[in-house]
Image (cartoon, rainbow, N blue to C red):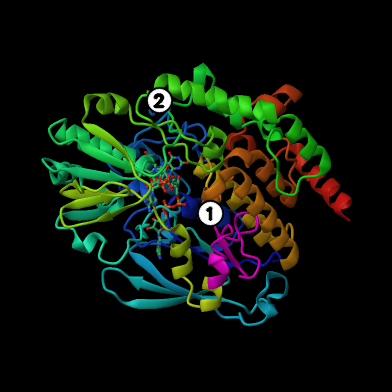
């Protein structure tokens, strides 16, 4: 894109938007951030009382802004996380670049999206994006023109995933109340607990939101009004990050662990190696599973998943179980109920294969979000809407998990998941500003699409039906290597062979440019030529 200074419109001021803003400014570009809320922090601005960071804080850390020493817990609570994010925004003077209470209604490309000229490579300097923004207080609308758009709208809020039901079997026939987990989270803590108190509650889902909400319901209601958790699939939810005392990061977040996994588009040598190491991959997965079964009575409650932990970690489904959860299950204040599908009747919920309805007053759908729909809805052009959604049986098509090959001058940050999303967003931001700066050029549309197809195969191979989560969790170093090579950085960030292969990689490994980075850049490009 050259060395010209750009006007960059960033949508969202959560972790991803703040990082994007900081990196864009660091390269001397002009940044304007639109945030529909009145403060920074995104999902961390409103959580339920018990929410904590699930990732060890040293992995969920801005590489140039360490956690304050006053935060001693490895898993800070939501207030501490929000304070940390806000301090980052103030420290780097980002607030002055943010327009709060400004909801982006649509973005429209002012080039020619109908022909091939919309591809990245031939897009001229005249091509602009129009951002239509509504002031949520006055409802007035204003349009902005920018050279580049970065979508940081988040994927776990705003657009709920609501299950589909047969005709006359949906929530409208039910005489009780049905809400989504996001409605529960939107209540303040007192209101939420009085809302559920004394009610028969069913929580649908078995991931983090469901676990936390069920735990809160059981605290409010005890065994008099047990909370039923209705789930489709049990999961290898984690008691902690220390299976048999070994930090999970040593099992999955180092280079050796990644050798055991087949990579997108790998050569023969890496493929053979991953095949030869498949017993190690299997053994590590079993090692973690045995620890979870040891710490949680999964067998007793029929909660042993059929899939492996390897699949779980490759789907980024590594929710931690609230402390004391299975004690509540044992006491009877939480009832676990498997159901492949369900629907509603007047008095409650009909469970597949059961004749009598499960009577209830309140159903909380902790069934996740439609992050892809949220991305789609922001585009004015039907064509770009279709492009960004891609095909439902393939991953959301983002090259390097960031740019769509056919949507020029636009990047998405925060869609791909990992085990520590802040770190992932920061890596992508680094890569993106080097692209903006012209340090490297994107390959042709065809090459980018082939690369996306290889990632699609990888995600289907390891995450199975969860492939659309676009999880790079168990291949993060290899992914970072691609970004480093593009940027001309030496991908090897550790000192010494043992550290390089066996120490976990995290945000601090990329905190500083190394002396070898520049030389490496030239070597890489010479080799490519
Ligand atoms: C409760 C909870 C806990 C989590 N815990 C962890 C964890 O422990 N570890 C981990 O790695 N990940 C965790 N995650 C995942 C989390 O989503 C990421 O870690 C990260 O905070 C996401 O940041 P983001 O900026 O990409 O998105 P968000 O935080 O969702 O921010 C998006 C921002 O965009 C704004 N926005 C959206 N649409 C518009 C629009 N049209 N116009 C203007 N503004 C808009 C929103 O208001 C919001 O402020 C958690 C998620 C949730 C929901
Ligand atoms: N740090 C924290 O404390 C915290 C708190 C809350 C959320 N989070 C994060 O926020 C993100 C979103 O979490 P989430 O729990 O809201 O959503 P999620 O991870 O997407 O989980 C959705 C759950 O709903 C179930 N589900 C989806 N569709 C269903 C259907 N049609 N019928 C029955 N069940 C259905 C899924 O079941 P299947 O498994 O069978 O598909 C899954 O159990 C995650 O990254 C999570 O880690 C973190």
The answer to whether 59 appears left or right of 183 in the picture is right
Please determine whether, in this image, residue 388 is positioned above or below residue 247. below
Does the magenta portion include 99?
no
Which image quarter holds the N terminus?
Answer: bottom right
Image location of residue 479, percent across then percent down: 66, 45
Does the magenta portion include 406?
yes
Residue contact between numbered discs 1 and 2, judged by CB atoms under 8 Å: no
- Identify the residue under disc 1: 468
Q: Nearer the viewer, residue 91 or 427?
A: 427
Q: Residue at x 10, y 40 (%)?
A: 198
Q: Nearer the viewer, residue 381 or 465?
A: 465
- Identify the residue under disc 2: 299
Image location of residue 442, percent across then percent down: 72, 62
Q: CA distance from mark 1 to mark 2?
A: 30 Å
Q: Nearer the viewer, residue 13 or 374?
A: 374
Residue 279 found in image quarter: top right
In the image, the segment drawn in magenta is 386-413
Q: Nearer the viewer, residue 427 or 332?
A: 332
Answer yes or no: disc 2 within 8 Å of ligand 2: no
Please determine whether, in this image, residue 294 is positioned above or below residue 442. above
**Magenta stretch: dominant SS?**
loop
The answer to whether 172 appears left or right of 428 in the picture is left
Q: Secondary structure at mark 1?
A: helix
Bin the neighbour count of mark 2 within 10 Å (Cα to Cα): few under 14, some 14-19, many 20 and up: few
Image location of residue 490, percent across then percent down: 75, 41
Image location of residue 247, percent across then percent down: 53, 23
Q: Is residue 51 visible?
A: yes
Q: Is residue 213 visible?
A: no
Residue 505 found in image quarter: top right
Q: Residue at x 72, y 60 (%)?
A: 450
Residue 278 found in image quarter: top right
């Amino acid at each position: 894109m050259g060395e010209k200074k750009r006007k960059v419109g960033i949508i969202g001021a959560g972790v991803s938007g703040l990082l994007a803003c900081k990196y864009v400014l660091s390269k001397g570009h002009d940044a304007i951030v639109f945030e529909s809320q009145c403060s920074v922090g995104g999902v961390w601005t409103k959580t339920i009382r018990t929410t904590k960071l699930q990732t060890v804080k040293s992995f969920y850390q801005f590489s140039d802004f360490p956690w304050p020493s006053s935060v001693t817990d490895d898993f800070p609570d939501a207030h501490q996380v929000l304070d940390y994010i806000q301090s980052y925004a103030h420290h780097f003077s980002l607030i002055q670049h943010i327009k709060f209470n400004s909801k982006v209604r649509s973005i429209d490309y002012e080039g020619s999206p109908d022909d091939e000229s919309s591809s990245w490579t031939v897009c001229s300097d005249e091509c602009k994006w129009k951002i239509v923004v509504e002031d949520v207080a006055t409802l007035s609308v204003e349009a902005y023109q920018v050279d580049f758009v970065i979508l940081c709208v988040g994927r776990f809020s705003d657009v709920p995933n609501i299950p589909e039901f047969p005709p006359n079997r949906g929530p409208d026939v039910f005489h009780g109340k049905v809400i989504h987990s996001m409605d529960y989270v939107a209540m303040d803590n007192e209101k939420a607990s009085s809302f559920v108190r004394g009610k028969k509650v069913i929580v649908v889902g078995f991931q983090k939101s469901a676990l936390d909400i069920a735990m809160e319901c059981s605290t409010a209601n005890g065994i008099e009004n047990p909370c039923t958790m209705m789930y489709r699939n049990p999961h290898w939810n984690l008691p902690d990050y220390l299976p048999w005392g070994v930090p999970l990061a040593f099992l999955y977040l180092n280079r050796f662990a990644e050798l055991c996994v087949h990579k997108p588009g790998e050569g023969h040598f890496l493929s053979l190696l991953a095949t030869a190491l498949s017993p190690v991959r299997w053994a590590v997965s079993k090692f973690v599973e045995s620890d979870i079964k040891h710490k949680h009575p999964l067998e007793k409650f029929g909660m042993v998943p059929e899939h492996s932990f390897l699949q779980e970690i490759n789907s980024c489904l590594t929710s931690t179980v609230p402390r004391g959860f299975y004690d509540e299950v044992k006491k009877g204040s939480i009832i676990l109920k498997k159901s492949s599908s369900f629907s509603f009747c007047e008095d409650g919920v009909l469970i597949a294969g059961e004749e009598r309805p499960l009577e209830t007053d309140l159903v909380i759908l902790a069934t996740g979000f439609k992050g892809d729909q949220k991305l789609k809805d922001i585009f004015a052009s039907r064509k770009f809407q279709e492009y960004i959604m891609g095909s439902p049986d393939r991953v959301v098509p983002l090259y390097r998990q960031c740019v769509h090959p056919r949507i020029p001058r636009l990047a998405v940050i925060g869609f791909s998941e990992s085990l520590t999303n802040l770190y992932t967003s920061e890596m992508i931001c680094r890569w993106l500003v080097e692209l903006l700066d012209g340090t490297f050029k994107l390959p042709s549309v065809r090459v980018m699409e082939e690369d996306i197809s290889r990632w699609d195969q990888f995600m289907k191979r390891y995450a199975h039906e969860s492939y659309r989560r676009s999880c790079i969790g168990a291949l993060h170093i290899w992914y970072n290597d691609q970004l480093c090579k593009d940027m001309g950085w030496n991908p090897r960030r550790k000192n010494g062979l043992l550290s390089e292969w066996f120490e976990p990689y995290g945000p601090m490994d990329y905190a500083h440019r190394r002396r070898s980075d520049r030389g490496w850049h030239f070597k890489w490009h010479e080799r490519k030529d």
